[in-house]
Image (tube, grey):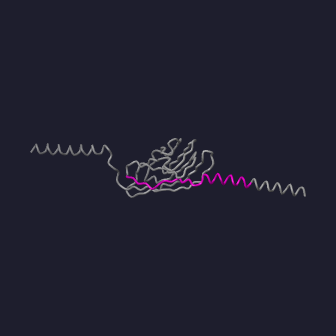
Amino acid sequence: KETKIGGDRMEKMLVLLVGLLCLLCLVSLTSAAGLTVSVSDETGAKGDIAKVPIILEAASDVGSMDIVLKYDADVLRAVAVEGAELGKNAFIEANTAREGEVIIALADSSGINGDGAVATISFEVIGDVGSTSPLTLETVSVNNVELVDVITTTESGTFSVTEEGAPKPGDASIVIIAITAIIIALFVINRRK
């Protein structure tokens, strides 16, 4: 009987320990649940530089993120990644060298909290009017400041080329010079008659 009582006591302790561990894991996961990482639908004109934000909703003590965003390299060309409002204090490292893919690593030891853009990707719009590109969050890995994985929902977007590029500041000068040259040529021709 002594062995059975000792065994029962050991079994109860083991069940209690497993239960406490499960509760601890559940509390960690619950505190991290609810984070959404998204890219909204964006538009831009051929020849322009379009800014595409990476948006966080319900961020709470986000310490690090690894993001892989895929896009159509026939429509867009990634040129830069920079921190946005939520990522203003974060260390950001990005790779835009591979066509069709942007890789972002972000870390903030003080933790990122709230809703808003954490980073902005600048794309050169190279597609023709009417073309579209998926903005697919292929991989998103998030940890809190204590290095615990954060349960994350992702929402990808689409980029649409909607109009011809807006005139550049120098374009107006060229038009004025061309019109002036035409007027002078007409004046010279009329004077010779």
Task: Give the image location of residue 2, x and y in percent.
Answer: 90, 56
**Which residue is rendered at x = 57% and y = 49% of the image?**
60
Assess whether residue 20 is covered by the magenta stretch: yes
In the visual, does 92 lie left or right of 171? Answer: right
Front residue of 27 and 138: 27
Assess whether residue 38 is covered by the magenta stretch: yes
Residue 18 falls in image quadrant = bottom right
In the visual, does 168 lie left or right of 60? Answer: left
Task: Give the image location of residue 115, x and y in percent.
Answer: 51, 50
Image quadrant containing the C terminus = top left
Task: Give the image location of residue 72, x and y in percent.
Answer: 46, 54
Task: Give the image location of residue 176, x and y in percent.
Answer: 24, 44
Image quadrant containing the N terminus = bottom right
Front residue of 81 and 47: 81
Q: What is the residue that sits farthest to the right in this orientation?
A: 1
**Which residue is rendered at x = 85% and y = 56% of the image?**
7
In the visual, does 46 lie left or right of 142? Answer: left
In the visual, does 26 lie left or right of 37? Answer: right
Total numbered labels: 0
Q: Which residues are magenta?
A: 18-45
**Which residue is rendered at x = 89% and y = 56% of the image?**
3
Front residue of 160 and 17: 17
